[in-house]
Image (tube, helix red, strand yellow):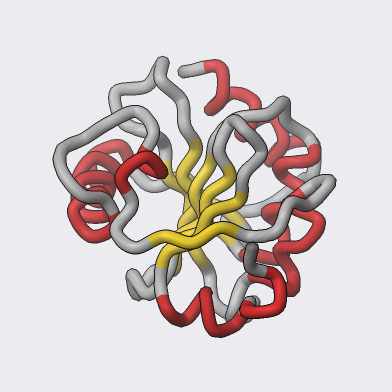
Amino acid sequence: MGEVTKEVEDAIVTLELDDNIISKIDARYNDILYFDLLAHFVNGKDRRWWWEAFKSSFSFKTFDYSPDHFLKIIPDLTQKVWLMVEDDQEKFYPIYDVDPKYICGILNECFGFEYYIIDKDYKWLLCENHHGRLIGVGDVLKKHNLSLLD
């Protein structure tokens, strides 16, 4: 298990979150989903930092701590999303099926790393990179957050 994955797994235990709130995508399907998301959101081939080649991205204003704003940024808090964490010690970045209302709490329990929050209908993606920059992809996310864009 990679260091970032262990951080997330430890956060899940610390916060006592059950499978109804967050569950890791089975390894047999994680790589399939990973490459499907890559093809949909990124130009070109696989790369460590997807945000360097997003298809039609936009930037958010700078926040002191981006996760504190997710409850207003994420367009629909009633639908689960995917949380993909950058863990270069894993074969593919781990992906979690998660209730978006808990993402901030999970990230609060972890050290800093890049992550992607992705709509399960492929309508939008939200990323925070290692520069603390919050980046979005998708018209649904953009329209929902016009007042928060750079």
Instruction: In the displayed orientation, state which residue is furthest to the front.
Output: 150
Number of marks in picture = 0
- Nearest the viewer among 108 and 67 is 67
- Nearest the viewer among 23 and 146 is 146
Residue sitting at 40 percent across and 72 percent down?
138
Residue sitting at 62 percent across and 44 percent down?
133
Query: Is residue 66 positioned above or below 27 on the image?
Result: below
Q: Position of residue 108 (x, y in %)?
A: 79, 40
Residue sitting at 46 percent across and 57 percent down?
82
Horizontal relation, residue 24 to residue 37: left or right: right
- Nearest the viewer among 150 and 139 is 150
Q: Which quadrant would residue 60 be assigned to in this image?
A: bottom right
Quarter of the image that includes the C terminus = bottom right
Q: Position of residue 124 (x, y in %)?
A: 42, 69
Query: Is residue 107 positioned above or below 79 on the image?
Result: above
Query: Is residue 77 positioned above or below 44 on the image?
Result: below
Q: Position of residue 149 (x, y in %)?
A: 64, 68
Residue sitting at 70 percent across and 78 percent down?
147
Q: Position of residue 29 (x, y in %)?
A: 24, 46
Horizontal relation, residue 4 to residue 69: left or right: left
Horizontal relation, residue 76 to residue 110: left or right: left
Query: Is residue 91 positioned above or below 80 on the image?
Result: above
